[in-house]
Image: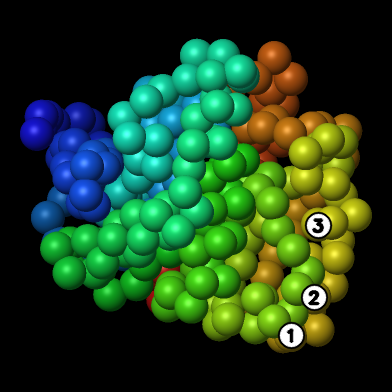
Amino acid sequence: MAQFQTQNGQTEFLNYFQDANGFLARAPRAGLYPGIVLIHEWWGLNDYIREEAKKLAAYGYNVLAVDLFGGQIAQTPEEARLLVQTVDPNIALENLRAAVRHLRQREMAMKVGTLGWCFGGGQAFRLSVSGEPLNVTVIYYGHVTADKTDLDKIHWPVLGIFGEEDDVVSAEAVRNFETALSELNIPHEIEIYPGVGHAFANPGNPKHAVGEKEDAWNKTVAFLERTLKN
């Protein structure tokens, strides 16, 4: 697989599950670091996601950006919708669990978290309620539920980033999710940004909200620092 150097450390494409090739971005200096399973939007493992992986790695993480679409990248919403429809949820879960194993076994990460946006946010949630032991979950406007039977499988902190005007994941659903987390005493931080909609953090979105994205990123970095490095 191709391997190359960036200002944020060593990066490479690697095969971690069946025919899935992920993008691994390592921390700038040699050593043992927490791991993060990064999950792409419905567009696939594109340049934007790889750049986000490198940005996170620069803070002292080994970040494995997974591929749930078999190397395909959508250019239009229609293509993206078709790709999502082809995903077998059981195989996707196996894929994500393989990514966790890679970080724990190959990268020697003592702590591993997951972070996903949109489609990937929903997949981060599914991984978190699957029984897979993690140390942190970060969900950017992904589908969540308030089902306590599912949520009771989470034994670590959760950060949720959402938009109040989201027409995919409603603010009401998010508030129900937040209430259920509170009732189960699961540590959490839920941010619902007023006046912004779905995928507001993606610079390719015409309704990209620059200020809210920067605030959400700062909250994410601080959250990961508190939870994965302590």
Say what amino acid the circle numbered 1 marks: Leu
Say what amino acid the circle numbered 3 marks: Val
Q: Earlier in the sequence, mark 1 or mark 3?
A: 3
Whole-number angstrom distance, CA of label 2 to CA of label 1: 6 Å
Instruction: Classify residue 11 by image quadrant.
Output: top left
Residue on which the image places disc 3? 174
Q: Residue at x 34, y 72 (%)?
A: 111
Residue on which the image places disc 1? 184
**Closer to the camera in the image, 157 or 154:** 154
Tag 2–tag 1 contact (CB < 8 Å): yes
Residue 1 location in percent, x, y? 9, 34
Whole-number angstrom distance, CA of label 2 to CA of label 3: 10 Å
Q: In the displayed structure, does residue 203 sit left or right of residue 38?
A: right
Whole-number angstrom distance, CA of label 1 to CA of label 3: 15 Å
Q: Secondary structure at mark 1?
A: loop
Residue 84 location in percent, x, y? 54, 36
Instruction: Classify residue 42 by image quadrant.
Output: top right
Residue 6 location in percent, x, y? 20, 30
Q: Secondary structure at mark 2?
A: helix
Residue on which the image places disc 2? 180
Residue 5 location in percent, x, y? 13, 31
User: In the figure, 185 relative to 157: above or below?
Assistant: below
The 10 Å Cα crowd at callout 1, few under 14, some 14 to 19, many 20 or more, is some
Q: Residue at x 74, y 79 (%)?
A: 148
